[in-house]
Image (tube, helix red, strand yellow):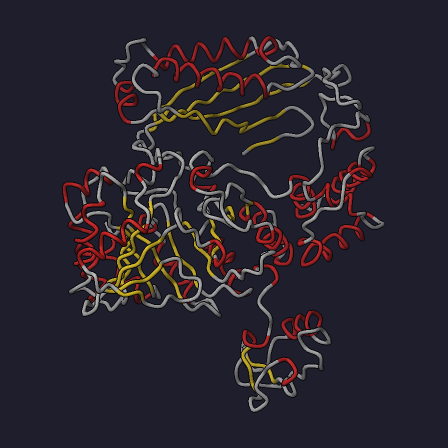
Amino acid sequence: MSGCLSKRCCTFIRSNFVNSRWFPRPIVMQHSTRSDVVEVPNLGSVGLDRSRTKYNLKEVLPFSAFLTDSFGREHNYLRISLTEKCNLRCQYCMPAEGVPLSPKSHLLSTDEITEISRLFVSQGVNKIRLTGGEPLVRPDILKIVDNLAKLDGIENIAMTTNGIALERKLPALKEAGLSQLNISLDTLNPAKFEFITRRKGWSHVMRAIDKAIELNYTPLKINCVVMRGLNEDEIDDFVQLTQTKPIDVRFIEYMPFDGNKWNDKKLVPMKEMLEKIETRWPALERIGDLPNDTSKAYKVPGFKGTIGFIASMSQPFCGTCNRLRLTADGNLKVCLFGNSEVSLRDILRSGATEEELLTVIGVAVGRKKKQHAGMFKLAKMKNRPMILIGKYYIEVLTMYYTGNILLMKRKLSFLKDRENVSSVKKPKDNYMMRKVGARMLDRFSHKVGGTFSYATYSIINGDCARAFSTGHDGDADVCLTHVDQHGKAKMVDVSGKNITERVATASGRVWLGGKAFDLLKVNKLSKGDVLTVSEVAGILAAKNTSNLIPLCHNIPLSKISVTLKLDDDTESVMVEATAKTTGLTGVEMEALVAVSVASLTVYDMCKAVTHDITIGDIKLTHKSGGKRDFSQ
């Protein structure tokens, strides 16, 4: 785009900021040779320099409301996880057997990463950091860096890597636009490196550090997670490294995540590390930190490099946090330690507009808490459950995005007409209504006719109490079919349905870990043939579904098949079951029960080897023959 500002941009500025408290006088748009420059005369009243007639838009406009939380924190830094895969198995990061990997189709594509990033950058994000897993195992890494570096408004493309594959890729990455680099290294001892990471590769990391210095990545940041009894004896060695190398060694307090068996006895707090360093270098001096820095910076006089401390546990820096995180499967996390996420991937793939996507982002950011729960509570929390912000709010948004206006109207009507709506209080946090929600709810109001009360807003936003079916036959699409209008369980009457051939397929996975998986591969587990026994167990369970699940009908199955396959990459067993019948109702539950019991049987027959077994990802993948066919 060249010449003057686009018509859309001018319209946006006029509609949102002209004659508001930001611009008490009208803005006059004039032609310019730059697309991001606007003529702004007579703006001394809003604190701008009268001697200047041209301002960049970022200097004139307030920071995006979508990326500002209820505590006034402006989020201009986006961290994007490119992959769940990693070529190391660091003890503080993941269990020895690795982590359950999402199917490739669940991960963000190159274009989706670029599109979501462009949206964030348009709202004020000027720094993006690429993380993982290990970002360099992603084959399209150069394309991603190149795409992001070309975004209008981006100032810094950074990457955090373990350095194993960095040396040979770094020149091309730098040319593509990678401007800042963090390398993870927890020990200067090759044997200890192998113990910590459960892999070889120390020499590769050291060569990568030298290559980064050679290519003028200054300061090159070295991330060192300090764990008591493991590497706290090397703190001085890392400081000594800064004498001759222009690096910034950042000592990170050991943090709790799922699978890393965190306990406070392994934690070495910043105060203790600092006292240890000052014993050897008493002249150690505190140097200034940049705004929003997570690291508290220090320097030994005369040394080329610096050191810093990231004290997430002992001295949290939540008050100045400006970071948002996007997971590899497209979920937005507003806090590293938070357990709330919202899927931008699903919303993007549903065909949502930019405005609708920004609305969801704005609500998520607005709900960011003042600070994390504290290290002892964090250690007990699950780090990545899928909890969508505002159950009913997201449900209604999804209906809107997919064009199902009729279903959305029925859902909203159901929520508004519930008997206990009047008892729902206005929420204390009106962030959504104040900044982004009012326009969205007003649009919903236009779609369905009429306006919303605060009680209805509360329900949509997920702040209401228990919801149950109205039990009206006409509202079957939006009702819980196994619950009557009084909230009591009931069996569904299927006598009015058509007799058709019905098929359902479900799948699941059992992650075993290396030892049990290796024994299973050669069929040497003490309890016998795990795969055959589990297959039979799944078939028997499917045939007894109505005895296990109280409200299921007793269905005569014409076919039930259960298959178990070994996945060497993840050291897991993939379980799939297909059920078939000709009758009045579907066989989804039969397929799901078969997968569940087959998975439990695998667990039972392998538990003598290890209890570190995970069953998960159990889901329906196909359903046909009923009113709503389904496949994924």
Q: Position of residue 177 (x, y in %)?
A: 35, 66
553 or 561, which is in the foreground? 553
Q: Does the image show residue 395?
A: yes
From the viewer's perspective, is 338 left or right of 359? left
Q: Position of residue 106 (x, y in %)?
A: 48, 41
Residue drawn at (20%, 37%), measured in percent from left and top? 195
480 or 584, which is in the foreground? 480
1 or 55, which is in the foreground? 55
Residue drawn at (51%, 56%), measured in percent from left and top? 116
Q: Position of residue 217 (x, y in %)?
A: 27, 66
Residue drawn at (52%, 28%), measured in percent from left and top? 619
Give the vertical position of 333 relative to 218 (above or below).
above
State the quadrant of the N terminus: bottom right
305 or 159, which is in the foreground? 305
State the quadrant of the C terminus: top right
Residue drawn at (30%, 44%), measured in percent from left and top? 268
Q: Does the image show residue 82?
A: no
Question: Residue placed farthest to the right in the image?
Answer: 450
From the viewer's perspective, is 465 left or right of 555? right
From the viewer's perspective, is 474 left or right of 73? right
From the viewer's perspective, is 200 left or right of 494? left
Q: Position of residue 289 (x, y in %)?
A: 37, 66
